[in-house]
Image (tube, rainbow, N blue to C red):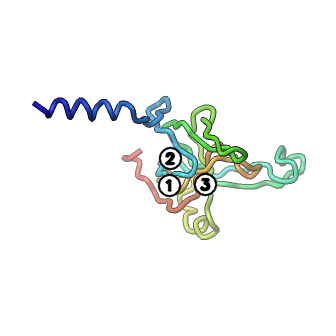
């Protein structure tokens, strides 16, 4: 009978393929440059900006950004800007800075401090303006009901 041999062959081949990396807490591994859809609570946070990115009280410009906080932790994989090599972002990711244009900020004010689903492209933080290890360049943001979190 050929069917078991075919199944065994397929299983053998699938076992050789790399599987997804899974973070503790059942979250998947998010990859720099890939699309994502994440659900969590949107927060507005203010961080120190130029000139030193250290302390608003000591004269750094305050910069306010929206942060999506997920209940589910994720692992993250990014690529070095210098070498292009892949690396694992340390720790679990539950906070994602949202990159929005002025229309998105204006049109979605009602979602601040609410649950929302965000879709967009992921990228690793790499400047003083990036306040989470991974950010989302937002394509869409919409309300998420309490039932579905």
Q: Nearer the viewer, residue 33 or 4?
A: 4
Find residue 78 and report its horizontal and vertical position in percent: 61, 43
In this picture, is 117 found above or below 132? Answer: below
Q: Are marks 1 and 3 in contact (CB under 8 Å)?
A: yes
Screen quadrant of the N terminus:
top left
Q: Are marks 2 and 3 in contact (CB under 8 Å)?
A: no
Q: Residue at x 67, y 43 (%)?
A: 80
Q: CA distance from mark 2 to mark 3?
A: 12 Å
Q: Residues within 10 Å of mark 3 (few under 14, many from 20)?
A: many
Q: Which residue is under mark 1?
A: 118
Q: Residue at x 47, y 48 (%)?
A: 39
Q: CA distance from mark 1 to mark 2?
A: 8 Å
Q: Residues within 10 Å of mark 1 (few under 14, many from 20)?
A: many
Q: Are marks 1 and 2 in contact (CB under 8 Å)?
A: yes
**What is the number of callouts on the image?**
3
Q: Nearer the viewer, residue 58 or 39?
A: 39
Q: Which residue is under mark 3?
A: 98
In this picture, is 146 found above or below 28? Answer: below
From this viewpoint, is residue 43 visible?
A: no
Find residue 32 and report its horizontal and vertical position in percent: 58, 47
Left or right: 138 as drawn, with respect to 26 = right
């Amino acid at each position: 009978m050929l069917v078991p041999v075919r199944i065994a062959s397929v299983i053998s081949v699938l076992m050789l393929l790399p599987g997804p990396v899974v973070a503790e807490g059942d979250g998947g591994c998010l990859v720099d440059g890939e699309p994502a859809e994440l659900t969590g609570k949107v927060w507005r946070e203010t961080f120190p900006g130029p000139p030193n990115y250290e302390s608003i009280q000591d004269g750094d410009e305050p910069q306010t950004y929206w942060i999506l906080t997920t209940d589910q932790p994720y692992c993250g994989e990014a690529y070095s800007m210098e070498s292009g090599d892949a690396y694992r972002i340390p720790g679990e990711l539950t906070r994602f800075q949202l990159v929005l244009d002025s229309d998105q900020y204006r049109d979605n004010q009602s979602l601040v401090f609410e649950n929302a689903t965000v879709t967009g492209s992921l990228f690793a933080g790499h400047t003083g303006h990036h306040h989470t290890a991974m950010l989302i360049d937002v394509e869409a943001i919409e309300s998420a009901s309490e039932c579905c979190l």
